[in-house]
């Protein structure tokens, strides 16, 4: 089923550029978004039914990468605070982030379900935008059929 995604690489690049504004207006940085996109897989639901077929984002792995998203955020904060000398709180953020990733933190630990939900909504919006793009270029039917093969 990888073949169908290989056939739309150029279309994905176009949608990526168009979707940048949406990412910038979200709670995720572009670095976090890149990590999120590596954790999802695009799939086609109901591929055998032209009326119901749609691209969906398989977000099953998102909770597993959330600690790494927090590390990215901490590193970005530390880089911003580095010149100001506020390394004490930045270092604590990294240590707390690592403790949380290892399940050792005392402050709630675990995955931030609100961020997972936000990532799921944004990735599905991306999948919808990709499908709309393919439909506008009259490629959707070809992609749907390629998925089934």
Image (cartoon, helix red, strand yellow):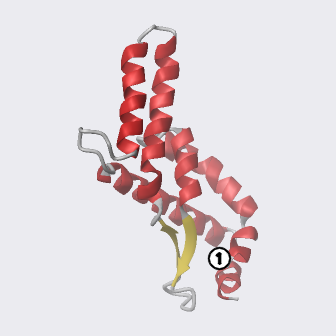
In the image, 61: left or right of 118?
Answer: right
Q: How many marks?
A: 1
The percent coordinates of residue 143 (x first, y second) are 68, 78
Residue 13, relative to residue 124: is it above or below? above
Residue 47 or 99: which is nearer the viewer?
A: 99
Q: Position of residue 145 (x, y in %)?
A: 68, 86
Identify the residue shown where x is 62% and y is 72%: 135
Q: If the image is split into quadrants, where does the C terminus sit?
A: bottom right
Q: Position of residue 97 (x, y in %)?
A: 39, 36
Q: Which residue is pictured at 43% across the width and 30% down the height?
A: 94
Q: Nearer the viewer, residue 107 or 81?
A: 107
Q: Secondary structure at mark 1?
A: helix
Is residue 138 at all visible to an observer of this figure? Answer: no
Q: Is residue 33 visible?
A: yes
Residue 18 against residue 90 in the figure, above or below:
below
Q: Is residue 34 left or right of residue 109?
A: right
Left or right of residue 57, residue 10 in this image: right
If the image is split into quadrants, where does the N terminus sit? bottom right
| Quadrant of res 67 | top left
What residue would you read off at disc 1?
140
Query: Residue sitting at 54 percent across and 58 percent down?
Result: 39
Q: Nearer the viewer, residue 101 or 71?
A: 101
Compare residues 63 and 126 and report the one nearer the observer: 63
Task: Report the residue at 64% width, 47% height from top.
Answer: 17
Count residues near mark 1 (Cα–Cα under 10 Å), then give few for <14, some for 14-19, many for 20+: many
Q: Position of residue 33 (x, y in %)?
A: 53, 46
- Quarter of the image holding residue 108? top left
Q: Is residue 103 left or right of residue 67?
A: left
Q: Looking at the picture, does residue 71 appear above or below residue 47?
A: above
């Amino acid at each position: 089923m990888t073949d169908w995604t290989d056939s739309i690489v150029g279309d994905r690049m176009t949608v990526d550029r168009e979707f940048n504004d949406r990412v910038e207006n979200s709670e995720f940085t572009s670095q976090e978004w890149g990590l999120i996109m590596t954790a999802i897989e695009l799939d086609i639901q109901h591929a055998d039914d032209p009326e119901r077929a749609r691209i969906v984002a398989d977000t099953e792995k998102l909770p597993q990468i959330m600690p790494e998203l927090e590390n990215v955020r901490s590193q970005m904060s530390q880089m911003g605070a580095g010149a100001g000398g506020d390394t004490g709180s930045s270092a604590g953020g990294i240590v707390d982030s690592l403790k949380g990733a290892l399940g050792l933190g005392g402050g709630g630990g675990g995955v931030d379900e609100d961020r997972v939900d936000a990532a799921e909504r944004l990735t599905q919006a991306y999948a919808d935008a990709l499908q709309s793009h393919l439909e506008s270029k009259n490629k959707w039917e070809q992609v749907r059929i390629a998925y089934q093969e």
